[in-house]
Image: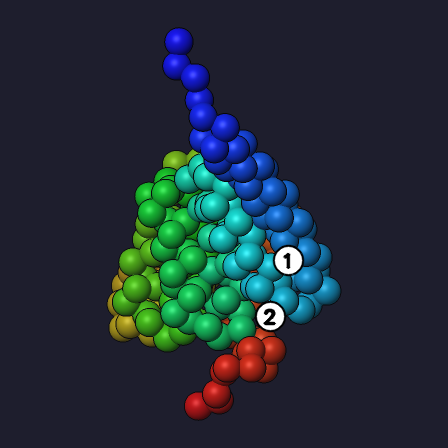
Amino acid sequence: MNILSPLLIALLLSGCFAQTLNKSHANRYYSYAVQSEKEGNWFEARKGFARAWTNVTLAHGGDEAIAAVAYEYGRTSGVICDWEEAERGLLESYKFHKNTHSPTLVELARMYHAHGDLNKSEEFFHLAKEALEKNPATLNMFPIDFANFLAEFAAVLSSLGKLKEAEQIVKSEKEVRNKYKGNSTFQNPTPYGRFCHQNPRHKPT
């Protein structure tokens, strides 16, 4: 029979305790971030999601949990014009979900659009459209939100001079709006780049 040394037992127990503590911290910071976002304090929200990300990673919370927190970190970073961190967070989420998670794809498309990287924005709008169209149940639940998404996609294509493609997307948008006339939107798009003033490191250009 192998007998663990008292020191090894202490190390194992401390490791389990540390993971439990990190999970608790992650939940607390995540809740704080969500509340801060509701109050319109995007800088504090980003700070909370950053700490939640650190703690869920230390707690070995799993790829899906890390991707979920990274997604929120990326969104809130983009709102306060920290574009590098916005990209880092959303791409971390994208790395886990690949091309199947439409919310992450939509956020990347919108973030790049707000930042002015139209080519990257177009790339992710295409991917997001494909992912959304594979889930008709989602489209039926949020048709006007999908129509708004198509309108944004068309605007990006028009800015790139791809007018024929833009016309096709606009046609699809109108078809959705006509089919679901009277429906309301249920989602508030992330306000990328609209709260730069909350970021003390942001320098207006």
Give percent across and percent down for residue 34: 66, 55
Which residue sits at x=36%, y=43%? 96
**Which residue, as the protein is rendered here, is positioned at the far bottom?**
205
| Quarter where residue 87 is shown | bottom left
Whether 190 is drawn above or below 95: the answer is below
**Percent position of residue 26, x then y:** 59, 48
Picture quarter containing residue 118?
Answer: bottom left
Q: Secondary structure at mark 1?
A: helix
Quadrant placement of the N terminus: top left
Q: Which residue is mark 1?
A: 33
Position of the C terminus, as image quadrant, is bottom left
Query: Could you tell me if residue 123 is visible in this image?
Result: yes
Dot 1 amino acid type: Ala
- First in sequence: mark 2 vs mark 1: 1
Horizontal side of 155 relative to 199 (left or right) equals left
Can you say whether 168 is above or below 138 in the image? below
Q: Which residue is mark 2?
A: 43
Residue most extreme to the top? 1
